[in-house]
Structure formats: C-alpha cells, structure tokens
Amino acid sequence: MDKARSKRRRGLPALLVALLYLAFLACPLALASLDAQKTPIWREIASGAGALGFAFVLAEFVLSGRFTLVSGRVGIDAIMRLHQFAGRAALVLIAFHPLLYVSPRLSRDPADALSTLGSMFASGSLRSGAVAWALTMALVAMAIWRDQLHMKYETWRLSHGLGAALIAGLSLHHALGIGSHTSAPALALYWQVSFTLAILTLVHIYIVRPLRRMRRPYRVASVEITAERTWLLLVEPCDGDAVSFEPISFEAGQFVWLNIGHSPFSLIEHPFSISSAPQARHLQFLIKESGDFTSRIGSVKPGAQVWIDGPYGQFTLPDDIGGHKLQPLVFIVGGVGVAPVLSILRDLEKWSPKRAVSLIYGNRLSSQIVALDELRAMEARLGLSLNLVLGEPPENWNGLTGDLSERILSPLLTPLADGARYMICGPPPMIDSVELTLKRLGIGRRAIFTERFRY
Ligand SMILES: Cc1cc2nc3c(=O)[nH]c(=O)nc-3n(C[C@H](O)[C@H](O)[C@H](O)COP(=O)(O)OP(=O)(O)OC[C@H]3O[C@@H](n4cnc5c(N)ncnc54)[C@H](O)[C@@H]3O)c2cc1C
C-alpha cells in the first residue's frame, strides 16, 4: 500500500521547485550584472525591476498550468497561492519600472520628471512596453477584484490567459528592442527561450492535454439529489457503449476538474473533490448548487459526455498505513466540504479500521447533512467519533448547535490528541476561522491540512 501511495505522488520535491523558481527569477539579474556595459545605479535598479517583473510573469505560465511535476508534491493549493502572490509582485515591480527611471529627478524637479515619464509613455519606441505596463495593471487588478466584476468565471479565465500571453509578447518585444543590457546575448537568449517555454505551456494546456484526455472518455452514470441543494453525481469511464472499468487512479481526498457535456478543448470545467473511495466502480461527486454550472447540475442527463483532468490535491491520508503508530485524524468540515472526507473515510474502512478518527460536521439545516446513515454506520464499523453541528436545528435536535466556532470546537478538541492530523474542508471563510481556532488551541501549522473550495 505504501508503495502504491508514493508511486502516485509524482512531482519534484518542494525544495527543488523553490530553488528552480528562485534561480529562474535571479537569472536575468545575474546575466545583466555580467554585461560589461554599465549604466547609473538608478537605471540599473529600474531595469532590474522591469526584468524581474517580466521573469515573474513568464514563470506564471508554468505555475498556473497544473503540472504534476511542479505541484504534485508541493500541492496545487500552495502553487496557486504562489501564483497569486507572484502576480502581485510582478504588478509592483512593473508599476515601478518606468517610475524608477525618473526617480532621481522626482525630488529635484517633479514637473520635469513627470513630463519625462509622459514622453516615455508616448514614445513610439517604448509603445510595446507601455501597453504591456497598462495591461499588467489591468490583468492583476481583474484577478484581485474578480468577484466584484461579476464576470463569468470562464470569460475571466479566457481574458486572463490571453492577456498574460499578450503581456509576455509585448514585454519580449520591449526587452529585446530597448531594454538595458539587450546587447548581452545570454540575456537576449534567456528572454527568447523563456518566452517560447511560456507559449509552449499554453499549447500543452489547451491543445496537447485535451487531445490526451480524448483517449479517456467518461460519461454520467446518474445524477440525483441527495440533500438540500446537493447532488450526487456518478461518473464512469466509457468507450462507445461499452464501459471500460479503468477510472483514474487517485488518492482518497483528491479532486479533479470536470468538464460535462462540452468539447474536451472547452474552458468550461469545474473543480470537484471525488467522494468515492479509490478503486470504486464509479467516481462519485457531491455537488452543491452555488452558481451557474452547479445550479444546473440536476438537469444533466445520464450518458452525457464527461472529460476529467486530474487527480490533483494534497488533502490526503498520511503515509503511515501499515506502520505501527497510526496518526489520529480529526476532520472538521462545513457543508459540501464533507465530499473529500467521505472518500477518505471510505478508504480508511478498507485499510486501517483501528485508527482514532473523528469528524466534526457543520451544516445550517439538518436537511443538508449528506450520507448520515453511512456515517452512523462508520461510528460502529470504523470507531468514528461523529459530531454533527447545526446552525438552525429542528426542535428535537440532540446534537450541537451553532457554527464551527471556538465555543463549539474547543471542548471537542481538548485535551489535544497526541500527534493528530487536523483536516479542514469547506468554504474559505470557514477554513480561515477554524484554522485560527486551532492555532489558538495550540495546534501547530504543520498538523493542519486544508482544502479550500476556491482558487
Ligand atoms: C479544490 C476544489 C474542490 C472542490 N470540491 C467541490 C465539491 O466537492 N463539491 C462542490 O459542490 N464544490 C466543490 N468546489 C467548488 C466548486 O468548484 C464551485 O462551487 C464551482 O466551480 C462553482 O461553479 P458555478 O458555475 O456553479 O458558480 P460560479 O458562480 O460561476 O462560480 C463561483 C466561484 O467558483 C469558482 N469557480 C468557478 N468555476 C471554476 C473553475 N473552472 N475553476 C476554478 N474555480 C472555479 C470561482 O471562484 C468562482 O468565483 C471545489 C472547489 C475547489 C477549488
């Protein structure tokens, strides 16, 4: 079992990913410093900021590309957070890049400095750089304030990808045409190779990967309502009319991107945790109605074509199965956040029934609780300690009442189980507040694992 687990976790170690990333960012600065041609220090700083900002932009293509090599062991959640942080870093560096050129004059003669800045933006030779500058500001702002824009996710994603490619192309033109140290052949080569890799990344994501996906078609086996506004979707591999029983191999707790009823090249796909155990006949998903796509899930017909990208995610069991000391597990979930935990519990029933496992499962209403009978059966079969929490309980409710706050969690979690792994899943605000509570109770960061239902 341990062998099978480690085989599935492909990808570079986190330290190597970090080192490669830093080396890639440092490369243009190092190559520029080797150039014999020197300019005044503030010009070096200004061009350095632009170069570093451009390197950040180029690396974003790889970070956001869902590459197992990059995120397989680091975790896609961590990589997506790095992607978001790097976008902001690029924004600051690129925003300051032209300002730094005029900075010495800003204190002496601000009007002159601003007029020089204006002419820089108006200059024909700097046009590609100026457009890339404006586009970067717009693109990052659109990503930060995505929710406030009320834009369809798919429209935003398309504009984000195309915008980034345009910025990269214009920045390349700017760097090679007018950038400082462009005469250094090694630096020019770095920009050309990195840009080509960024574009190849897009080709891989939007052409090669869908083509590969076409070799593994799936279809909807059934969709039925299972709790209030929550649907149970079963998906099976299919090859024409025949069912070939080789669904993707995944670890309990992982998720996939599902594309239902669209071309494999479509951008319309959504991330969902798999709630069935690995090796189950069907892939099972719990889908809560929340927006455009999820609200229409009930109208999907059995037989509809499904394309799957995945599995991804690190919200999985520790590698101690088969070992002597089994780590206690504490799951704290809100609403449909129970989906990956069901997969894990179902897996655990097969592998290690003798582990201390508890589940604190919060919902607003009792009608929203999923798989209650199965969870009750797990109390006996798995020794699961099940605590149901309802925000608005019915009159005869004998479970806990409230939200997953410190008042509820503290008595359930203390005294702290020795060496326990705390796994939290649900909407980001709930995760943030539970994480804070756990830290206040003295639980270390390394013991806490989260799956945020949002990127
Ligand atoms: C790792 C992960 C696992 C998830 N597992 C589950 C699950 O098991 N069950 C469940 O009900 N929900 C799950 N979700 C949430 C689910 O993906 C969203 O509710 C769904 O995509 C919303 O789509 P919509 O069109 O209905 O709503 P919209 O209103 O269009 O989208 C709401 C928000 O969902 C996110 N979203 C939408 N489309 C995508 C996309 N293609 N890629 C990434 N984010 C997107 C965006 O943040 C968007 O702002 C998960 C999310 C993540 C990130």
Image (spheres, rainbow, N blue to C red):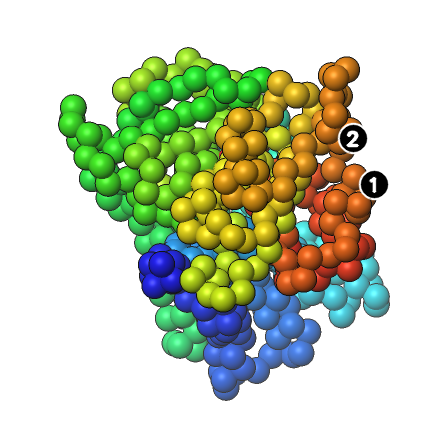
Q: What crowding class fits label 2: few (fewer than 14 Cα within 10 Å), some (14-19), or many (20 or more)?
A: some
Q: Name the secondary structure under disc 2.
A: loop
Q: CA distance from mark 1 to mark 2?
A: 9 Å
Q: Which corner quadrant holds the C terminus?
A: top right
Left or right: where 298 falls relative to 402: left
- Mark number, residue 256: none
Q: Identify the residue under disc 2.
A: 402
Q: How many marks?
A: 2
- Mark number, residue 407: 1
Mark 1: is the Cβ under 8 angstroms from ligand 1? no
Identify the residue at horizontal 65%, vertical 72% (top origin): 45
On the image, the x and y values in percent for residue 326 come to 53, 60
Q: Image quarter for residue 4? A: bottom left
Three-letter code for the amino acid on which mark 1 is drawn: Arg
Left or right: where 230 falls relative to 5: right
Identify the residue at horizontal 84%, vertical 67% (top origin): 108
Q: Are marks 1 and 2 in contact (CB under 8 Å)?
A: yes
Q: Nearer the viewer, residue 177 or 322?
A: 322
Q: Name the secondary structure under disc 1.
A: helix
As displayed, is residue 338 above or below residue 411?
A: above
Identify the residue at horizontal 55%, vertical 20% (top origin): 227
Residue 83 appearing in the image: no
Three-letter code for the amino acid on which mark 2 is drawn: Gly
On the image, the x and y values in percent for residue 436 come to 76, 50
Q: Image quarter for residue 397? A: top right
Q: Which corner quadrant holds the N terminus?
A: bottom left
